[in-house]
Image: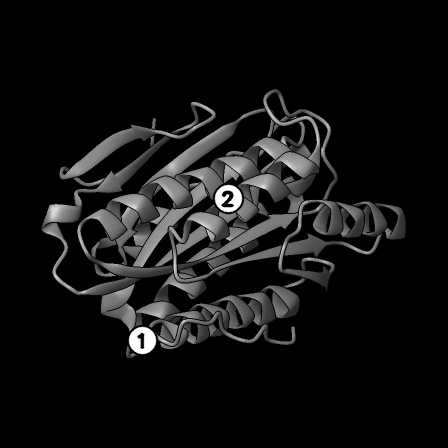
């Protein structure tokens, strides 16, 4: 269950029986939305930069709130370690208080990377279907942030299943476009190479090597994500995804 959410949230299940929550589409006031998922690794190796990562999440939130398209953004926050945990479901950006991200991450355990990626893709697909069914125009962008490779997924055992899910979304035209960005943290070349392989095998849109999680690099990450969200939202209605930005 989500760790914090508003009262008008509804619970749902995806094709693989992942759980997610989302604001009731009947309460939405705009005619089009960009769905945003931030999927944060909180395995034990992330512990040294937990506080800085929470500050980064707040910076992303605050930067997106300043966007001219802020009223058209729906955001979901997920963490993954041994399991996949929804910290909050799809909510209108304006309803999220940055203070909610204080001490929100719980670092422990291993890295269920495949499950977390598929969970968020399927949740985006399911909510996208709801929006489309109520005549909302929608596109999506997802960021998976990790400092390690897969070692603990239960449902998804190979990246090809993720690739199949992305192909299904595009074939069924659930969303105008979906962009998936994998962000590798750290400088361990062996890990970065494994993540590059995952990015290719899963058919993800973009792979970004962030470097070590220093305050400067995390500030750059916040800027990259907020600008990518803004670019994706501005592309809504063109029939095409936005062009990937350079980190």
Q: Residue furthest top?
A: 154
| Quadrant of the drawing holding the N terminus | top left
Secondary structure category for the residue under label 1: loop
> In which quadrant of the rendered view does residue 97 lie?
bottom left
> In which quadrant of the rendered view does residue 233 lie?
bottom left
User: In the rendered structure, which disc, 1 or 2, sits on the residue that comes first in sequence?
Assistant: 1
Which of the two residues, 148 or 150, is positioned nearer the viewer here?
A: 150
Q: Give the residue drawn at x 55%, y 71%.
A: 224
In this view, the mark in front (1 or 2): 2
- Whether 202 is drawn above or below 175: the answer is above
- Whether 150 is drawn above or below 175: the answer is above
Q: Residue furthest right?
A: 190
| Quadrant of the drawing holding the C terminus | bottom right
Secondary structure category for the residue under label 2: helix
Taking the image as shown, residue 135 lies to the left or right of residue 27, namely right
Query: How far apart in space, not on screen, are marks 1 and 2 (Cα)?
Result: 34 Å
Q: Give the residue drawn at x 43%, y 65%.
A: 59
According to the image, label 2 marks what residue? 168
Which of the two residues, 213 or 120, is positioned nearer the viewer here?
A: 120
Residue 240 in the image: state x and y as whole percent: 46, 72
Mark 2: give few (<14), some (14-19) or many (20+) Cα within 10 Å. Answer: few
Residue 235 in the image: state x and y as whole percent: 40, 75
């Amino acid at each position: 269950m989500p760790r914090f959410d508003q009262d008008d949230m509804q619970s749902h299940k995806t094709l693989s029986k992942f759980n997610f929550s989302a604001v009731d589409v009947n309460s939405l006031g705009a005619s089009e939305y960009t769905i945003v998922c931030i999927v944060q690794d909180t395995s034990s190796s992330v512990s040294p930069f937990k506080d800085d990562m929470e500050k980064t999440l707040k910076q992303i939130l605050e930067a997106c709130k300043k966007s001219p398209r802020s009223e058209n953004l729906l955001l979901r926050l997920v963490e993954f370690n041994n399991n996949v945990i929804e910290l909050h479901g799809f909510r209108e950006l304006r309803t999220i208080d940055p203070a909610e991200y204080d001490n929100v991450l719980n670092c422990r355990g291993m890295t269920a990377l495949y499950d977390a990626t598929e969970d968020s893709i399927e949740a985006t697909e399911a909510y996208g279907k709801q929006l489309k069914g109520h005549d909302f125009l929608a596109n999506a962008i997802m960021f998976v942030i990790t400092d390690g490779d897969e070692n603990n997924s239960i449902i998804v055992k190979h990246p090809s299943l993720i690739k199949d899910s992305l192909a299904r979304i595009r074939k069924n035209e659930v969303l105008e476009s979906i962009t998936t960005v994998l962000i590798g943290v750290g400088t361990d070349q062996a890990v970065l190479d494994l993540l590059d392989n995952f990015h290719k095998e899963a058919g993800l849109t973009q792979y970004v090597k962030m470097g070590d999680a220093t305050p400067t690099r995390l500030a750059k990450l916040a800027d990259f994500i907020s600008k990518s969200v803004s670019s994706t939202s501005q592309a809504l209605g063109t029939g095409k995804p936005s062009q990937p930005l350079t980190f």
